[in-house]
Amino acid sequence: MAPPLVPGRTSLGRSCGFVALSFALSWGLWIPVLLADPDAGQWTLVLGGFGPALAAAVLVRLGGRGVWSWLREIAVFRLPVRRYAVAVGAPVAVVALQLGVAAATGTPLSLGELPVGVVEFAVVFVVVALVGGGQEEFGWRGWLQPALQERTSPLVAAVVVGVVWALWHAPLLGLYGAYEHIVVYLYVPTLVGLSVVIAVLWNRSRRSVLIAIALHASFNASTGLFVVGGQAATDPEVLFIAQGVLAAAWVTAAVVLAVRYGGGSARSPVVASAAPSLR
């Protein structure tokens, strides 16, 4: 049997240490490189994105466990197909809502581009799942969420993870050109709401990080399905409304799930009984 990650409950200090190490690894690359060259390229984003996963691996080793045994424990593949369908389909449904609102507010749609968008979605989904953001989940849901759930409710833990997740992106929001159209006060609640949704699905899927990766990848890839016509694709007002719908959709989903399952404890119905722990 693998030794416990830490004696007893995961200390608050270790959770703070994980956050600090994640930020140090990611920001330590992003900030100096992007300050020197704001157009440094996608590789900077990708490499820095491994910060949370590497931080989790370090904490696992410090806790006396092997990284491979930890990965085998959290990467549960055999789950009901409907769980994967929800993970992939939920962000797509939100984009459909965005398109509906865009059409209702007079924004022209380019539905003829949708087949290309679907292909792009599939390709980006795979890339994101492997190296473009999905790997973050080994840190966020593979380490931090279960560590916090040992001390508080799944809902509170998910909100904290969401806030940390949003703050972790701060250098990109300020320095990386691809993020220049993002409205920060809409982005933060979007990630907090998304974090709650991921946590509920993750808890009810034997705490498999793979289901979290699937939802994360679909969320990132689904932007390619927002097919609006002509100059509308870069129109600040169109993008603002789209981000507002995105935030409202994920926050609403989070509230509905919170009401449905309650804040609960680590043993509430939100958590699958067979879920592995950090110990």
Image (cartoon, grey):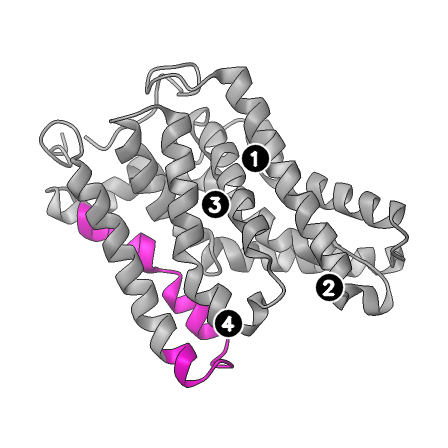
Residue 13, given in percent of the width and then of the height, sits at 16, 42
Tell me how far mark 1 sits from mark 3, CA to CA.
10 Å
Query: Mark 1, mark 4: which one is toward the viewer?
Result: 4
Left or right: residue 110 versus residue 67 is right
Residue 94 forms part of the magenta stretch: no
Camera-nearest residue between 211 and 100: 100
Q: In this figure, which residue is indicated by the disc labeled 2? A: 236
Q: In this figure, which residue is indicated by the disc labeled 4? A: 176
Residue 42 forms part of the magenta stretch: yes
Marks 3 and 1: in contact by CB < 8 Å? no
On residue 84, the disc is 1
Q: Secondary structure at mark 2?
A: helix
Q: Which residues are magenta?
A: 33-59
Marks 3 and 2: in contact by CB < 8 Å? no
Q: Secondary structure at mark 1?
A: helix
Relative to 262, residue 183 above or below: below
Amino acid at the residue labelled 1? Tyr
Tag 4 or tag 3, which sits nearer the N-term? 4
